Image (cartoon, rainbow, N blue to C red):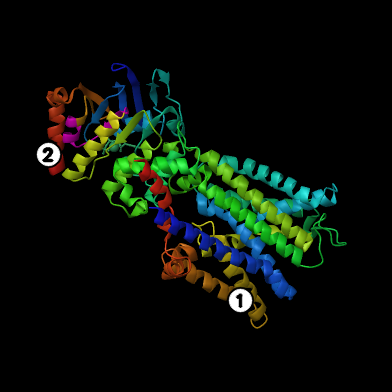
């Protein structure tokens, strides 16, 4: 029995080492990569994957398909930008305020559609994004179609403002990791079980004591707040925002990493983002000058292939693949995932 | 204690757009016992059950639980009141493992687990108890009917109910599986849980229930011990009629 525990411990340790090495690689990349173009792609991967994790909390874990994440992101960007430029509030503090504002707005707007079942949520999320965009285009306070700029100036952590891409790289990476840890925590918590139960069957959820409306609201608020954080990051990085940020196609972009990577997994958006975003950038750079639009076409083909052959995404395939068996047995040394939880079982049977 | 009524149903009626599925039905469930409800297909059993469990409200009438009016309670408030149910048409959480199905339940209700460890430990206990332990890592959609029926029960039990409603938990089981299910239900009852069950399998009703209610066309046509009910001429007529109809 203690042998088993030892095996599980070794497995955990090796897994930690492997993840640590991966993290170390990401931490070291800016030391070796000097091209701003490549650095930009990494920053893009970080914030788009984070946005996709936000989407996945609703789309993957709760089964509520949102097509409004660009709107939350845009609203978060606007809220924090205006707080910085008009109210003179410190950017970091504006980021938090922006998240709170967007969380509240999302909670209030979506409360009525969660009382109803069915596709209302998706429809309202589309309408919400479009309505918000139109509102901003027509509002002088929001800078109309010409958008809002953030002031440039000397590099400053206090003002989250840098000429180089490196600080944005690290902040983006930290944001991604923090949001990942948050999502992981949610997944294993009472809320995570509630959301997945709701995804599978709302009647079954209610029968065990879950109030579906309440948990769906919680999910949409958390998800919108994370999207708002990404919006703040984006605005600080680009230093200029306009209503185009909220167009529907941007919302679909937030869905793709999760779906390609595997929406059933918290890690799905990370895996999908790491593959799809550089691919999209590569195709654009390489082919859009030869034949405009061909890059989008090739992107669509890749996407269709993935969705057709792997409905559960790349991780859905990986979990049952020989690659995983190989990594488990040869690198991490034995315990397959099922056995990880055997430690608890050992404790249970000791009790009997 | 043995004579107190845990559930009292008073003159409940349910109309679905013109169709009266349940008509002025009243009965009570004795605390600590096993009460059964029988009747031909479409008699209104599940409808009655769903009203008591807050799935939808009765058009008319009241439902009391331990003397308190619960007619307007929402379905999700029931496990907090120590009431749990299963569904006739099983609702497994398809893409979750059997273990996760039960862990989810352990997190809710009046005895909600405070941590994942506690939830898992309770789930493990219940998986042992219901005989699903060996299958805990299988996705629930990959199991057959008998195991999905057990899972329905396991999920209900994980909320630690005092009152358990079972809607045709043995339908589609072979004789051996039926016998196992009967043993399981008896075991649950002996652990102190009051049970109300709908069942077509007479063998189960006769061996488990002290009290049986018979519904036909939405109305209560008889109640009493299994022996009393089975010897009731009207019940016999309804049942024999139904059986011939089913065989034809
Ligand atoms: N949601 C609903 N809307 C409309 N009619 C319904 C609804 N639910 C049930 N009915 C009808 O009410 C009647 C009683 O159905 P119910 O499901 O209660 O029967 P039952 O006794 O459980 O039958 P079975 O043994 O087949 O499960 C049937 O005629 C059914 O078609
Ligand atoms: Mg029924």
> Which residue occupies the foreground of this view, A140 or B114?
B114
Task: Decide whether residue B196 is among the magenta residues.
Answer: yes
Q: CA distance from mark 2 to mark 1?
A: 68 Å
Q: Is residue B236 visible?
A: yes
Residue A273 relative to residue B148: left or right: right
How many numbered badges does the structure rendering display? 2
Residue A290, horizontal then vertical, whole percent: 65, 83
Front tag of 2 and 1: 1
Residue B66, horizontal then vertical, whole percent: 39, 20
Res. A77 image quadrant: bottom right
Name the secondary structure under disc 1. helix
Q: Give the residue number, with chain letter if any, for mark 1.
A: A295
Q: Residue drawn at (37%, 49%), measured in percent from left and top?
A: B98
Residue A206, horizontal then vertical, whole percent: 44, 38
Residue A350 relative to residue A295: left or right: left
Q: Is residue A71 above or below residue A109?
A: below
Task: Decide whether residue A60 is among the magenta residues.
Answer: no
> Which residue occupies the foreground of this view, B219 or B122?
B122
Q: Residue drawn at (43%, 45%), measured in percent from left and top?
A: A201
Few, some or many residues within 10 Å of mark 1 (<14, 14–19, 20+): many
Residue A165 relative to residue A24: left or right: right
Q: Give the residue number, with chain letter if any, for mark 2.
A: B244
> Which residue occupies the foreground of this view, B127 or B20?
B127
Name the secondary structure under disc 2. helix
């Amino acid at each position: 029995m203690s042998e088993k525990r030892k095996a599980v411990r070794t497995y955990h340790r090796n897994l930690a080492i492997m993840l640590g090495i991966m993290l170390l690689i990401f931490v070291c990349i800016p030391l070796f990569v000097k091209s701003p173009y490549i650095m930009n792609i990494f920053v893009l991967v970080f914030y788009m994957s984070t946005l996709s994790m936000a989407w996945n909390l609703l789309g993957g874990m709760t089964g509520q398909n949102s097509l409004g994440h660009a709107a939350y992101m845009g609203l978060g960007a606007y809220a924090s930008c205006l707080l910085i430029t008009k109210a003179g509030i410190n950017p970091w503090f504006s980021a938090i305020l922006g998240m709170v504002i967007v969380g509240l707005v999302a909670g209030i707007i979506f409360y009525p559609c969660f009382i109803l079942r069915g596709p209302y949520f998706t429809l309202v999320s589309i309408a919400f994004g479009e309505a918000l965009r139109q509102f901003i285009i027509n509002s002088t306070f929001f800078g109309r179609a010409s958008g809002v700029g953030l002031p440039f100036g000397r590099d400053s952590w206090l003002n989250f403002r840098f000429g180089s891409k490196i600080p944005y790289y690290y902040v983006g990476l930290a944001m991604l990791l923090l949001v990942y840890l948050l999502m992981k925590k949610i997944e294993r918590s009472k809320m995570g079980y509630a959301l997945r139960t709701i995804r599978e069957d709302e009647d079954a959820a209610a029968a065990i004591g879950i109030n579906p409306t309440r948990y769906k609201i919680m999910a949409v608020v958390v998800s919108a707040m994370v999207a708002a954080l990404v919006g703040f990051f984006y605005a600080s990085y680009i230093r200029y925002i306009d209503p185009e940020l909220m167009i529907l196609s941007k919302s679909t972009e937030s869905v793709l990493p999760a779906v390609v990577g595997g929406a059933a997994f918290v890690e799905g958006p990370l895996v999908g983002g790491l593959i799809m975003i550089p691919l999209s950038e590569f195709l654009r750079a390489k082919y859009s000058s030869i034949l405009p639009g061909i890059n989008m076409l090739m992107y669509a083909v890749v996407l269709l292939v993935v969705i057709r052959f792997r409905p559960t995404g790349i991780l859905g395939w990986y979990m049952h693949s020989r690659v995983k068996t190989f990594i488990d047995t040869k690198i991490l040394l034995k315990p397959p995932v099922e056995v990880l939880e055997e430690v608890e079982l050992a404790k249970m049977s000791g009790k009997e | 204690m043995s004579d107190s009524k845990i559930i009292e149903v008073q003159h409940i009626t349910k109309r679905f757009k013109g169709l009266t599925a349940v008509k002025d039905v009243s009965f009570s469930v004795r605390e600590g016992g096993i009460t059964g409800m029988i009747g031909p297909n479409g008699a209104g059993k599940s409808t009655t059950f769903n009203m008591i469990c807050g799935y939808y409200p009765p058009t008319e009438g009241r439902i009391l639980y331990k003397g308190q009016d619960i007619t307007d309670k929402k379905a999700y408030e029931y496990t907090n009141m120590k009431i749990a149910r299963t569904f006739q048409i099983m609702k497994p959480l398809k893409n979750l493992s059997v273990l996760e199905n039960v862990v989810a339940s352990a997190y809710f209700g009046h005895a909600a687990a405070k941590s994942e460890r506690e939830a898992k430990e309770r789930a493990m206990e219940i998986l042992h108890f219901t005989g699903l332990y060996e299958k805990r890592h299988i996705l629930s959609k990959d199991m057959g009917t008998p195991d999905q029926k057990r899972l329905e029960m396991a999920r209900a039990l994980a909320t630690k109910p005092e009152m358990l409603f079972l809607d045709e938990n043995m339908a589609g089981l072979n004789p051996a599986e039926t016998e196992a299910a009967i043993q399981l239900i008896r075991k649950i009852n002996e652990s102190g849980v009051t049970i109300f069950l709908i069942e077509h399998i007479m063998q189960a009703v006769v061996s488990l229930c002290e009290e049986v209610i018979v519904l036909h066309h939405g109305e209560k046509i008889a109640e009493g011990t299994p022996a009393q009910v089975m010897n009731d001429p009207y019940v016999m007529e309804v049942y024999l009629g139904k059986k011939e109809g089913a065989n034809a």
